[in-house]
Amino acid sequence: MFFAAQSGLFLVILGTVYLAGLRDSSLLWVLVLSKALAGIFLVVMVSISEAPRIILLQAILDAAMGLTVFVAWRRDSGVLG
C-alpha cells in the first residue's frame, strides 16, 4: 500500500515543527526541506510503484507550498527585497 510508507509518528513530529516555525522562523528551513523531499519522494514512488498518477498533483502542491514559504521567509528576512 502506497501510504503505508509514510509513518504517522513522523508526520506528527513534522507538524509540531511546522507549528514551532510560527514562533521561531529559524525552523522554517525544516518546512522547506521537508516539502522538497516530499515532492521528490512522491515522484519517485509514482515512477517505481503502481501508485496512482494523481499523486503527482500532491508532489506539485508540496513543492508549491515549500517554494511559497521559502519566498515569504526570504522576503521577511529582507533577502528578496
Image (spheres, rainbow, N blue to C red):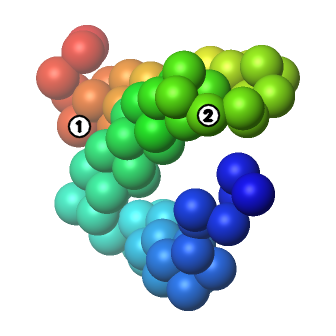
Q: Residue furthest top?
A: 81
**Based on the displayed image, in which of its 4 quarters is residue 26 positioned?**
bottom left
**Closest to the observer, 64 or 75:** 64
Which residue sits at x=49%, y=77%?
A: 10
Q: Which mark is residue 26?
A: none
Give the quadrant of the N terminus. Answer: bottom right
Q: CA distance from mark 1 to mark 2?
A: 40 Å
Q: Nearer the viewer, mark 1 or mark 2?
A: 2
Which residue sits at x=46%, y=39%?
A: 41
Residue 21 lies, with reference to residue 29, above or below; the image says below
Which residue sits at x=52%, y=28%?
A: 48
Given the image, on which type of amino acid does mark 1 rest? Ser
Residue 53: image x %, image y %?
77, 19
Q: Which residue is mark 2?
A: 49
Element assignment for label 2: loop
Residue 73 lies, with reference to residue 53, above or below; the image says below
**Closest to the observer, 68 or 55:** 55
**Based on the displayed image, in which of its 4 quarters is residue 51 positioned?**
top right
Q: Which mark is residue 77?
A: 1
Which residue sits at x=54%, y=21%?
A: 47
Given the image, on which type of amino acid does mark 2 rest? Ser
Element assignment for label 1: loop
